[in-house]
Amino acid sequence: MSRALNRQLGVMIDRRGRVSHVIVGDAHQLFIPDLKRHRAGSGRFRGIRLVHTHLRGEGLSEDDLTDLSLLRLDAIVVIQAQSDGLPGFMEVGTVRPEDNADTDAPWSIERKRSVGDFSDDFIAFIEQLERDLASTAQTTRVPGAEGAIVIGVSTQRGDEAEESLDELERLADTAGLQVLDRFLQRRRKPDHKFVIGKGKLQEVLVRAMQLDAEVLIFDSELAPSQLRNIATDTELKVVDRTSLILDIFSQRAKTREGKLQVELAQLRYRKPRLALMPTAMSRLTGGIGGRGPGETKLEINRRRADERQTRLEKQLRKLSKQRSLRRSRRRRVGLPQVAIVGYTNAGKSTLLNRMTHSDVDAEDKLFATLDPTSRRLRFPEEREVILTDTVGFIRHLPKDLIHAFKSTLEEVQEADLLVHVIDGSSAQIETHVSEVEQTIESLGAGHTPVIRVLNKIDAVSQDEWVRLKSEFDGMLVSAHTGEGLGALMVQVERHLFREQAQGTLHP
Ligand SMILES: Nc1nc2c(ncn2[C@@H]2O[C@H](COP(=O)(O)OP(=O)(O)OP(=O)(O)O)[C@@H](O)[C@H]2O)c(=O)[nH]1
Ligand SMILES: [Mg+2]
């Protein structure tokens, strides 16, 4: 028939052998119908294979293999329709489980001289393949954690993209995801449709299938249309750096104000994406693992989103007024304000704890702290200051997001002195420092005096201290061992009370 019509013909067959679709193409290709309703249950594949004809002696094409991975087909089979009308060779393409084979190709293609040569029990074969895939994945999987693949695009030379991707992995980890693999594509500029190239995306998808990953995390903010394209084409959960950070924030915010701020930031992020993609969004808005401030809340339409936003803004204004009252009360008592700022995980909370004998949460996690915490810090001669721990900064943090952290913002803006804590044991100090300084600047606190503190010196060698000290001109401390904290206290006191004596601070 294929020959007679001069068209490719295809049938989609499910695991019970039932034909779900018959597709008539043209001489070169087939258009596969929307298979959404045929989503496979728990199986890795969709439970449908496509068997189709080719007319020109060509084997499985690039497009065929794309369909195989994008549509999660059990298999894609091509049968050569010979000019004499008889079936010629046949090729069966399937996704390959991860193994030690020396080929990189994520799929295997088997060619038979004729259809008669194919005697395998297909169902047994595909079920075995699913088991193989599951077993490679299971050995490494953390129960209960969704598997994720992180993806970055590097447009410049240098390690920035790699480092940023490392950080994205840590963010994913903090969010409770398990990172199974990473992809970094070097290209001149991000693809406008899929961020990475289509071929790369295919590779990622096959990998996702092999590893049973459910989430793709992109290391850049995705435009609404990119998000839709990728989510629609892959049927995976698609997350970008911003939404991942938002997700972490929503998991970790503790105070009422913090929670409201996160919800507002999430609304702002999602609103432009809401109208565009009802289906992709419903998958996306659940938050990772269905957490986040309520899946239902986010399925609201735009109008309700606007209403909610107005309400949140009003509530936050009220809370902010209360905070400012508290602050001015503190001010009236005459206590100078010191804000501890720095890159996330630099040791800000540990330092606050150590200096004020408190026990604010400090963890080896990004964004352990979200809500500012203030403590009194006493000096000799009955002098006191208020020391405030703030949310950490991070690279590529969208402006919108930092402004969502109004309470931190206000603490930084109104501080008399900033203590900039730097993780001296990190390999990326420079990036961290410049990121934090830019953020301070953008908060309008560029003129506030800063004491730079290189923390964690217990974790680096003495030679390294010397280099750090000269390169970054900061005080060397260890919040763990307490080393250098006495000197830091003296500096803080000198900064605050010398100026006060001159009457510049509290006229
Ligand atoms: N070796 C060493 N580790 C430290 C030191 N100070 C803090 N840490 C560790 O660094 C990690 C982060 O510390 P936190 O105090 O939570 O850092 P933070 O800056 O408050 O981080 P976020 O609130 O997440 O932005 C924790 O595992 C601390 O134990 C130090 O002086 N030496
Ligand atoms: Mg902290």
Image (tube, helix red, strand yellow):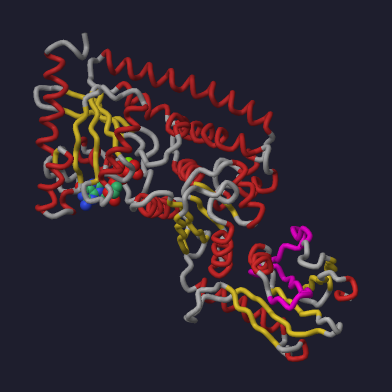
Q: Quadrant of residue 133?
A: bottom right
The question of residue 439 being in magenta is answered with: no
The question of residue 34 being in magenta is answered with: yes
Ligand 2, image quadrant it occupies: top left
Count of numbered labels shown in the rendering: 0
Q: Nearer the viewer, residue 292 or 79?
A: 79
Viewed as shown, does residue 187 lie left or right of 78? left
Viewed as shown, does residue 364 lie left or right of 117? left
Q: Which residues are magenta?
A: 32-59
Q: Is residue 366 above or below residue 384?
A: below
Q: Nearer the viewer, residue 257 or 390?
A: 390
Point out the image quarter for the C terminus. top left
Q: Where does the image place residue 238, in percent across and percent down from the top left?
A: 57, 51
- Residue 232 visible? The answer is yes
Residue at the spot 67% in from the left edge and 68% down from the top edge? 68
Q: Where does the image place residue 484, in percent across and percent down from the top left?
A: 11, 41
Q: Quadrant of residue 66?
A: bottom right
Q: Where does the image place residue 345, in percent across and percent down from the top left?
A: 31, 46
Residue at the spot 77% in from the left edge and 90% down from the top edge? 116
Which secondary structure dominates the residues rendered in magenta? loop
Q: Where does the image place residue 184, in percent across and percent down from the top left?
A: 45, 57
Residue at the spot 51% in from the left edge and 48% down from the top edge? 190
Point out the image quarter for the N terminus. bottom right
- Residue 361 visible? The answer is no
Viewed as shown, does residue 332 lie left or right of 230? left
